[in-house]
Each structure stands twice: as structure tokens, then as C-alpha cells.
Amino acid sequence: MTSASSTAVLVVVGAGPRTTGLLERIAANAPELWDTGRELRIHLVDPHPPGPGRIWRHEQSSLLRMNSMAEDVTMFTDETSTIDGPVRPGPSLAEWAAQFSGRGPRHTPYDEPSDPDVLAELRTLAGTDFPTRRAQSAYLDWVFRRALAELPPSVTVEWHRTTATAVTGPPDGPQRVHLADRATPLTADLVVLAQGHLGAAPQAHHRDHAAFARRHGRFHLPPEFSADADLSGLRPGEHVVLRGFGLAFVDLMVLLTEGRGGVYRTESDGTLTYLPSGREPVLHVGSRRGVPYHSKTRYRLKGPRPPLPRHFGPEAVDALLAEGRPLDLRRDVWPLMAKEIGFGHYHELFHAHPERTAYPWARFLDAYDRLDWYSPEMTALVAASVPDPADRLDFEALDRPLDGLSFPTPDAFQDHLRDRIAQDVARREDPEFSADLGAFLALLSVYGRLPRLVASGRLTARSVADDLDGWWHGFFSFLASGPPGFRLRQLLALSRAGIVHFVGAGIRIGTDEATGTFTASSPTVPGHTVHATALIEAYLPGPSLVRTDDPLLRALYREGALAEEVIADPTHTHRSGLVTVSPGDGHLVDPSFGGPHPRRIALGAPTNSRAVAAFARPRTDAPAFRQNDAVARALLRALSTAEPGTASPPGDAHPVRV
């Protein structure tokens, strides 16, 4: 063992929100677990500023916004957090912003953001506003500096503004993290990989479309982070097909319209009108569902918060695992998930809007608890106790709203979808429909229970591929991760202005060699084909270790030093593209070592832990916070007894100060 005065070294690759949350948990747990007589040096490696990282960096368009209200964004644990370490409450984005207008207490360390536009936004930011990403960047920067301020003096943090290219070293010895612009690697006792969301090289069909575009002098954009996309090659008036109708599409829509000088005007009747600059392309958008994601709610619960979980909590997962058989998510798990979401919905409806129900809550709940979600008895109960079908929860109708519909002309479909979008925005901004928010909170609870079920290995390979990573991920995003309502009102204005056209569901993309154009069609409007000189894949890159643009993960994968998650059974093999980590502690599974690597940990988006965003809605017992706390405690325990190697020299590191 080493002396108490020796220096322990931790290298964290990636310095975005996940790392910020980890540092906050290290600071919270250090009084219990760290010997202040021993030094701990933490190196952060990231070419982007620590705190916001790449995705939330300040240097992106000021037009881009979050899809969460300011009061629904926090980086701090609270009374709902089921963690072993201490709860350290802190302000939500809205509470933090209030200090700049004098509406709230000042938070230490206190510095006004240097960007005057961001400061002006924060001074007027209401809890129900959807902030710019630059405002979130400022909040994340402050959370990072607060975490540093709360570390004991024996813990120092240095930032290396570069890219990590490789990590080497034996399982029982020092690890060396190699940097892109430095000959001498960093030497560490433990390494944490927290790179966040990653890009990837295009898939084969994207490469085919790119080759077509090159042959004919056309524009093609494979899946890309919208803030990073180079859209300069799109000409004014050029017809562009966009495949994807989620948040990536919304960002691209903004950049190609307002971002090119167009403006919106509110008419005397409240209608939004778009005034083009003349520099916009013409956008044709479609997707599997053919409709945009549901608008985010912009109201609070009117009744008491639903006591979650109730039907899909730890006990329900225990019972599923105790059956000792392969599980199919849609058949065995989804009915419990649906019942939980339904509980959140009806809890709010009965408590906040009792005049729209026929039974007292206690009577309804007694029957609801006993019945299966898809049983005829449950259908009869809901029909009898909730008279208006608009107040009932119908997942199948929500999931595929265009199924069975077709339209004789493109104009007829434009009218239909505009009406649908307007109705969705009105509902999501009307507190009379606050039951939708109850369902949303239950959705978050359900999401947080799935990682344990996946880690058990009981879900069949086909179910993980098609149901979990396929249908469920898309359905959750469709219901819970949509844009603010004002973005959909802008979409309607763009549609009326002829800038955006709707293609339909089940979009099919093709190429026409004779005309050198991309084609798009949909069974929603039979016989209609769009020809365009540009194609944009309007969705984010999927996980892939084969195609990842992260040099460190790519090197480890090629060396056989990390494992892709592969779920196999006699009927199917599913390769998820995610890094396999051990459940709970996040240690990298290293095939060359034969198990979890004791000195390498991976967290966040690229891993099969499937934890959700690094920040969360307050009072939801966020899974990422639970993981951060568990990993921080494990790191402190391991580093307090580790046999350290030679501490890395400072080199070109930046000591981070608050």
C-alpha cells in the first residue's frame, strides 16, 4: 500500500453534463469517503468547455432552444433521490436564473454570464419558458464551477482541451490516456469514459445516397447533430426531402428559415404568419409516423403529484424476473408499463377534473388496481367512469395516428395534418388536459425502471432489438420528447407559407438517375411522388462501435478491449452498437481481460446502461443521478486504496478555478 500522502489520479474523458454530475457527487460524498490528507488529481479531457461540453456549448446558434421548461431542468438531487450518498439540493435552471433579476437568492459562485443576450434572457426567464441552449450552457457552466468549489482542498481538477485517442495499461496497473496533441500520455489509477452522445460514419445506404449526390451534383446530409451540420450547400428555393419528424427536424427547420433571415409576425387574430427572406429552401418532410412529435406540455399539475411507481416499480420487476423465463417486452412487460402510465393519467384526471369523471377516485382505483390493462373489464371500467373519449388514454391511437388514412391529394393531407398539429398544441397548452402531464410523469418513472430489466438478460434478443431499442424508444420520444408548442405553431406558419410540405407516413426514399433527383413518397397520399435535389436524414446518428467517430472507443473496439452489447438467443442475435458495462458500477467489460476491467468505467449515452439524460426534471428520482452517486462512491473508495502510478505532469492542462 502507498502512504497516505501519495497522489491518486483519475482521468475522465469527456467534460459535459455527465461528468459535471459525477463531480458534484464526488464533492458530495468526499466528506464521508475521502481522506483529506491524500491528494486526488482529476484530469478532464475534452476539446469543448467543461460543464456544457459539446452538445450544450455556448458556440451554437442562439435560435436553438431546449424542449424542456426552465423549471423542469435540474442537475441536483432532491428528496425523491434514492441514493446512498447525501442529498445536496440545488437550484433548477429557472431558480438559478431568478437571481439575475433579483427574484431569487444568489447562488455561489456567482458570476453573470459574459454573453449579454444570455444575461438578458435569464433576467426575464419564467419557469414555464423554454430556454435557449445557450442559457442551459450558462447553467451547466455554473453547476460545474459550484461542484469544483465544493471539492475538498486535497482534490484538484485540470482540463486538457484536446481529444483522447487511446487508453492503455493492464488491469492491475496504471492506465495511460493518450492525447491527440501531446506525446506524453496521462497516467491514471482509474479512467472514466463519459464522452456523451457521439457521431458515427454513415451507414451503407447513406453512403449510396451520398454517392448519388456526388454523381449528380446534389446535396446529401447523413444523420448529424443539427448544431454541427453544414447547411451552406442548400440553395434558396431548392427542394429538400427531410426524413425524420422529431427534434432534429425542428432544429433544421429553424436553421433553414429563421436562420436564413425569415421572421414571424403575429396577426390580430393571434395567427402566426411567416415572412420569408427569399433565402429558404423548400422542405418536404416525412417519417414512419408521418407526424411531428407531440408538443411538450406547458402547464403544471392541478392535482396532487401521482405517487409513483405503483404498477411498474421494483416489486413488479422482481416478479417478472422471478418467473425465470424469457420475457417479451410487448407481451409481458408493456401491459404493466401501460398500466403505470395510465395510473399517472387518471390520477390527475380524477383529482384535478372530477367533473369529467363518473366515479369517485377510490372506487375507480380499487377496480383499476385489480384489472389488466388490456382486459375487457378495464376497457369497460374506463368507458363507464370517463365519459368523454378525449379524456381516455389510447396508446394505439396515439402511436400511429395516420394508420388506415389516405388522402386523394397532397393539399388534402396538408389540411388534415395542419388541423391535427393545431389541436395537439392547443391541448398541450390547456391545463384542462393536465392528465397528459400525469401520463408524462409516469412515462419518466417507467423509463427509469427498464435498465434493471435489460441488465437481467431476461428480455429476448428480438424483443430488445424490435421492442426496446426500436418501438419503445421511438414511442417514448414521440410522446415525451417533443418540441415546445411555439415551434409547432411556427411549423404551421411555414406550411401555410409554402416553405414546408408534409409527405406522410411510411416515407419511402428513392433516387431517379434520369433526372438526378431524390424521390419521396408515402401511402398516405397514394400516387404522389416528390422530386428533390437534396436529401437530409433528419435524425441523430445511432450508436455504433464499428462506425463511431470517437477515436478512443474505436481504438478499444478494434483492439478487442471493449465489447459491443450483443444479445443472442436461439432465434435472433441483436448487436445494439452500445458499449457493454457491468450493471450498477459501469465497469467496462473487457473481452481481452475476461470480464469487467477494474480500472476503466464508462457512463452515459454510448453504454448499455441506457440511463437517460444527465440532467432531469426535479423530483423524479432520476436514474442518471442514481448512477452518478453509485459510481462516485465506488471511485472514491477505490482511489483511496489504489496503488497509484507516477502522477502525470501538468503539461498543457488548465487548472480549473471557480
Image: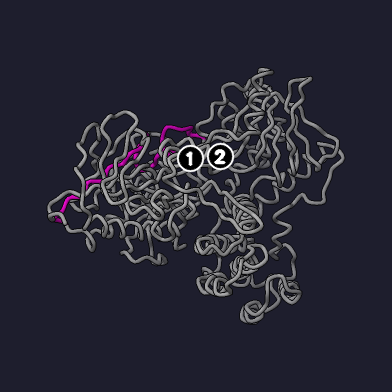
Front one among 130 and 634: 634
Does residue 44 belong to the magenta stretch? yes
Q: Which residue is mark 1?
A: 198
Disc 2 packing (10 Å; few <14; some 14–19; many ≥20): many
Give residue 245's position: percent from left, percent from top: 65, 41
Dot 2 or dot 1, earlier in sequence: 1
Relative horizontal placement of residue 22, taking residue 513 as reference (left or right): left
Residue 590 in view (yes/no): yes
**The C terminus - image quarter:** top left
Does residue 564 belong to the magenta stretch? no
**In what element is the residue under mark 2?**
loop
Q: Are marks 2 and 1 in contact (CB under 8 Å)?
A: yes
Relative horizontal placement of residue 240, taking residue 12 as reference (left or right): right
Q: Amino acid at mark 2?
A: Pro
Dividing the picture into quadrants, the one containing residue 30 is bottom left
Residue 479 in view (yes/no): no
Relative horizontal placement of residue 383, taking residue 220 as reference (left or right): right
Q: How is the image coloured?
A: one colour
Front one among 619 and 28: 28
Question: Would you place residue 237 above or below residue 371 in this image?
Answer: above
Q: Image point 44% across, 37% down: which residue?
A: 550
Q: Amino acid at mark 1?
A: Leu
Disc 1 packing (10 Å; few <14; some 14–19; many ≥20): some
Q: Which residue is mark 2?
A: 541
Question: Would you place residue 213 above or below residue 7 in this image?
Answer: above
Q: Which residues are magenta?
A: 36-63
